[in-house]
Image (tube, coloured by chain):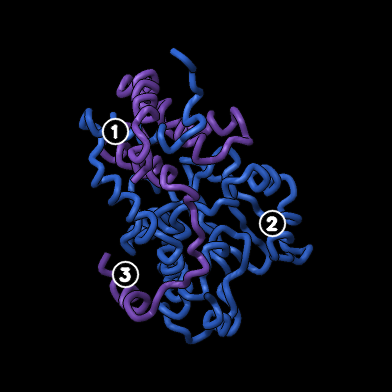
Amino acid sequence: MSSVRETAGDDPALRVEALEALLVERGLVDPGVVDDVIEHYETSVGPLNGAKVVARAWSDAPYRERLLADATKAVAELGFGGTEGQMIVAVENTPSVHNVVVCTLCSCYPWPVLGLPPAWYKSPAYRSRMVAEPRAVLREMGLELPAEVLVRVWDSSAEARYLVLPERPAGSDGMREGELAKLVTRDSMIGVARALPPGETGGRA
Amino acid sequence: MSRGTAIDADLEGSVSPPRDNGEIVFAAPWERRAFGLTIALCRSGACDWEGFRTRLVARIAERQSRPYWSSWAAALEDVLDDSAALARAQIDVREREFAARPHGHDHHH
C-alpha cells in the first residue's frame, strides 16, 4: 500500500465518493434515501419547528407544563421527533435564571426542533469556554446578563439534548402563536440570545 | 400531529419562515453527503447511531483542530470498519481508482 490514510485525507470529496459507491454496491445504502435525508434536514427540519414549540408553550399553559415535564413527548405532539432526536429536555428561562446549552464532547443538539447546529456550536472554543466562562462568551455573542441573573450551562449528550424555552418578550401580549413564533430565533433556543422584541421581526432578512 | 395544523397554516405558504436562522452548515458537497450517508445508514439499521456518536466524540477529541466534518467522515469509516460492513482498506482501493480516473471524470456530482 503506497500510503496509509488516517481517513478523508487530502481529498475528502474523493474519499466520501468512494465510500458511497461501495455502500451502494453492497446494498447498504440507497442514494435516493441519502438525498431525502439531506433534503429533510436542510429544509424541513429547522429552528422553525422549535419556534412553533416555544410559541405554543407561551400561549398554552398546560402545553408549557407538558413541555417542561417531558419535552420529547410534548415536541412529538406538534409532529416533531425522530430517532436522532430522542430525549429532548426543555429548560425555562425566567427573570432570575438564564439557561444556555453546549455540548462539550461533540455536537449533541436537538435536531428535530432546531435543525442542524451552527458552525460555532461545534467549535472547540465555544465547547470549552461556555462552561468555563459563560458570561464572557454570552457577552461576546451580544447577550449581556445582569449580575443577579443565575446562568445555568447545560451539557447536551445523547441522553439529554437541551432546548431553551426563552422568556416571552415584553409587549407580546395578545399576539397569536404564528406571530409569536417569528420572535423565536435559533439562538434564543440555544440560550445565546433572547427572543426578539415585537416589531423587530419585520426587519429580519 | 393534528395540534400542529393551525400554526403550520400560519407560518407556511405566504408567510415565509425567518431566514436569519438559515446559516449554511455545509461548506462542501462531500460534507453534506457524509452526513446524509450516516443518517441513512442509521435509519436502515446498517449503522448504530450511538456507536457512531461514540466514535465521533473520540475523533473530535483525538485532534481538536481537525475540521468537524472530517472527524465525522472518519467516525463513519470507524463504525463501518468495526462492524465489518466496509473495511477501510477497501475504501483506500476505491479512492485510488477514482483518483486515477481520466481528467473530466474526476469531478463530483
Q: Which residue is drawn at 33% across and 64% down?
A: A78
- Residue A77, image x and y in percent? 32, 62
Q: Colour of chain B?
A: purple
Number of callouts in the render? Answer: 3
Q: Residues within 10 Å of mark 3 (few under 14, many from 20)?
A: some
Q: Is mark 2 on a helix, strand or loop?
A: strand
The amino acid beneath tag 1 is Ala
Q: Which of marks 1 and 2 is nearer the N terminus?
A: 1
Please indicate whether residue A13 sits to the left or right of residue A97 in the image. left
- Report the front residue among A176 and A18: A18
Chain A: its colour in the image is: blue
Task: Please tell me how crowded label 2 is: few (under 14), some (14-19), or many (20+) other residues with Cα within 10 Å.
Answer: some
Q: Position of residue A81 (x, y in %)?
A: 35, 54
At x 45%, y 69%, the residue is: A57
* Mark 1 secondary-structure assignment: helix
Which of discs 3 and 1 lies nearer the camera? The answer is 1
Which amino acid type is shown beneath numbered disc 3? Gly
Which picture quadrant has residue B45?
top left
Q: Which residue is situated farthest in the right direction here?
A: A147
Q: Mark 1 points at which residue?
A: A21
The chain letter under disc 1 is A
Give the residue pinned by disc 3.
B4
For marks 1 and 2, give the one nearer the viewer.
1
Q: Which residue is rendered at x = 54% and y = 77% of the image?
A: A204
Mark pair 3, 1: CA separation: 39 Å
Numbered tag placed on residue A151 in the rendering: 2
Of residues A197 and A87, which is closer to you in this image? Answer: A197
- Going by the picture, which residue comes out furthest to the bottom? A174
